[in-house]
Amino acid sequence: PLRDRPADPSSLQCPATNDPKVYVTQRAQILAEWMKGKKSILCLTGAGVSTESGIPDYRGNRGSYFRGHKPIIHHEFMSSETIRKRYWARSLF
């Protein structure tokens, strides 16, 4: 039941601080405590997180789009078995 779940980490309060390092450390501790005992966690992020982590962005000079991988448009995907096979083949690598 929902009532047995721990609080959402974003709802937990930290002591007030103007020091960014202290703030981040406090938030990291709250998140680490919240994560304890979890079997799995899904984290949805924006593109900036992966880029900051060293993963090339899709349209950047090292990204997939720059190397020639163009997105498949929904209409193409739905109307062509060949396009769908191409999509799934690309998704595996």
Image: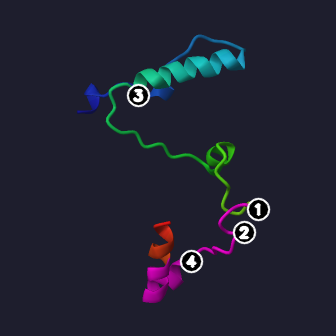
Cα–Cα span, label 1 and label 4? 20 Å
Residue 62 lies, in percent from the top left, at: 72, 60
Residue topped by disc 4:
72
**SS class of the residue under badge 2?**
loop
**SS class of the residue under badge 1?**
loop
Q: Is residue 64 visible?
A: yes
Mark number displayed over residue 35:
3
Work out whether mark 2 precedes mark 3 in sequence or the reverse, and give the earlier one. 3
**SS class of the residue under badge 4?**
loop
Work out whether mark 3 precedes mark 1 in sequence or the reverse, and give the earlier one. 3
From the image, state whether disc 2 or disc 3 is nearer to you: 2
Cα–Cα span, label 3 and label 1? 36 Å
Relative height, residue 81 to residue 30 (above, below): below
Q: Which residues are the magenta region?
A: 62-86
Work out whether mark 2 precedes mark 4 in sequence or the reverse, and give the earlier one. 2
Work out whether mark 3 precedes mark 4 in sequence or the reverse, and give the earlier one. 3
Is there CB contact under 8 Å for labels 2 and 3?
no
Is there CB contact under 8 Å for labels 3 and 4?
no
**In the rendered structure, which amino acid carries the disc numbered 3?**
Met
Is there CB contact under 8 Å for labels 1 and 2?
yes
Residue 12 lies, in percent from the top left, at: 48, 20
**In the rendered structure, which amino acid carries the disc numbered 2?**
Phe
Which is more toward the observer, 15 or 48? 48
**SS class of the residue under badge 3?**
helix
Residue topped by disc 2:
66
Residue topped by disc 1:
61
**In the rendered structure, which amino acid carries the disc numbered 1?**
Asn
